[in-house]
Amino acid sequence: DVKVTQSSRYLVKRTGEKVFLECVQDMDHENMFWYRQDPGLGLRLIYFSYDVKMKEKGDIPEGYSVSREKKERFSLILESASTNQTSMYLCASSLYGVRGQGAEEQYFGPGTRLTVT
Amino acid sequence: QQQVKQSPQSLIVQKGGISIINCAYENTAFDYFPWYQQFPGKGPALLIAIRPDVSEKKEGRFTISFNKSAKQFSLHIMDSQPGDSATYFCAARKSLYNQGGKLIFGQGTELSVKP
C-alpha cells in the first residue's frame, strides 16, 4: 500500500512564525504535490515537484516555498505565517506519467490542519 | 480556462436513491477526468476516472458520464448508502511532458445519505 505521511495532523502557529510542513512517501514516486483545501474552493495546488531538487509553482504559490532534497520527502515552508494561511494542507504523490500514456493516480496524506493566530 | 466548476456544493439523498454531481470545464486540452472521495479526517482517494475517448465508465454503483461536446462530466452513485457520505471532488488533468501532469480540482460536493 502506498503511504503518504504528514508530520502533524494539527498545528497552531502565531503570525510571523516560520512554519515547516513535512511530507514523506514510501513508494518511490517521482511526483509530489502540496495543496491547500478550503471550504467552497476545493483543492488548490501550491507547488509541485517532479524530481529531486526540482519544483514548479502551482496556482497559489505566494507566501509559500518548498524543498525537495530527497525523493521521498517534500517540505512546504511558510516563511512568515499569516492568518489567511489558516487552512488544511494536503500532500500527495504520484508516479511519473508519460505524456499520452496515461494519467497517474495521486495518493494523498491525511492532511495537516494549520491554524495561524 | 483552467477552472473546473462543480455543483452542487452540498447534496442530501435518501438511502437507495441516486446521487448526481456535475462538473464542467473549458480547456479542451484536459485528457483525464478523475473523481476523488474524501471521508472526514482523511485525505482524498481516487474513486473512478475516465478519459475523453469514452462516454461512460461504470465501476460497481459508481458511474461517470462524459459529454465531450458540452465539456461536462458527472458522477452518478446508484443505490446510495450512508457509507457513501463524504466529500466528492471532480478533477481534470492536462498532461505535462516529463512531469506527469497536474490536476485541477472542482470545488467539492458534500454528500449526505440519510438512512
Image: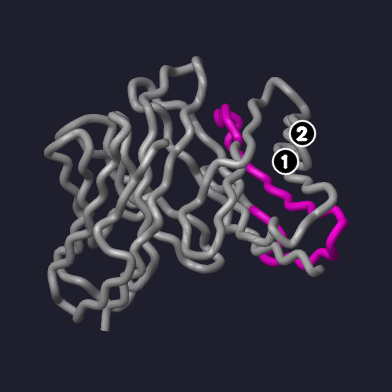
Label 1 Cα crowd, 10 Å radius (few <14 / some 14-19 / many 20+): some
Identify which residue, A11 or A5, lies in the foreground.
A5
- Secondary structure beneath dot 2 equals strand
Residue for point 21% across, 72% down: A81
Q: Chain of mark 1?
A: B
Q: Quadrant of the C terminus of chain B?
A: bottom right
Identity of the residue furthest to the front in this view: A1
Residue for point 41% across, 17% down: A98
Q: What label does residue B72 carry, if any?
A: 1
Residue for point 68% across, 48% down: B23
In the image, residue A60 lies at what x, y percent? 35, 55
In the image, residue B71 lies at what x, y percent? 70, 37
Q: Which residue is mark 2?
A: B67
Type of residue at label 2? Asn
Identify which residue, B48 or A77, lies in the foreground.
B48
- Colouring chosen for the image of the structure: one colour
- Secondary structure beneath dot 1 equals strand
- Label 2 close to label 1 by CB (< 8 Å): yes
Q: Dividing the picture into quarters, in which one does residue B86 lie?
A: bottom right
Q: Chain of mark 2?
A: B
Residue for point 36% across, 42% down: A3
Label tally = 2
Q: What segment is highlighted magenta in the picture?
A: B6-33
- Vertical order, A104 against A7 (above or below): above
Type of residue at label 1? Gln
Identify which residue, B44 or B83, lies in the foreground.
B83
- Vertical order, B89 against B14 (above or below): above
Q: What label does residue A8 carry, if any?
A: none
Identify which residue, B115 or B7, lies in the foreground.
B115
- Earlier sequence position, callout 2 versus callout 1: 2
In the image, residue A35 lies at what x, y percent? 38, 53
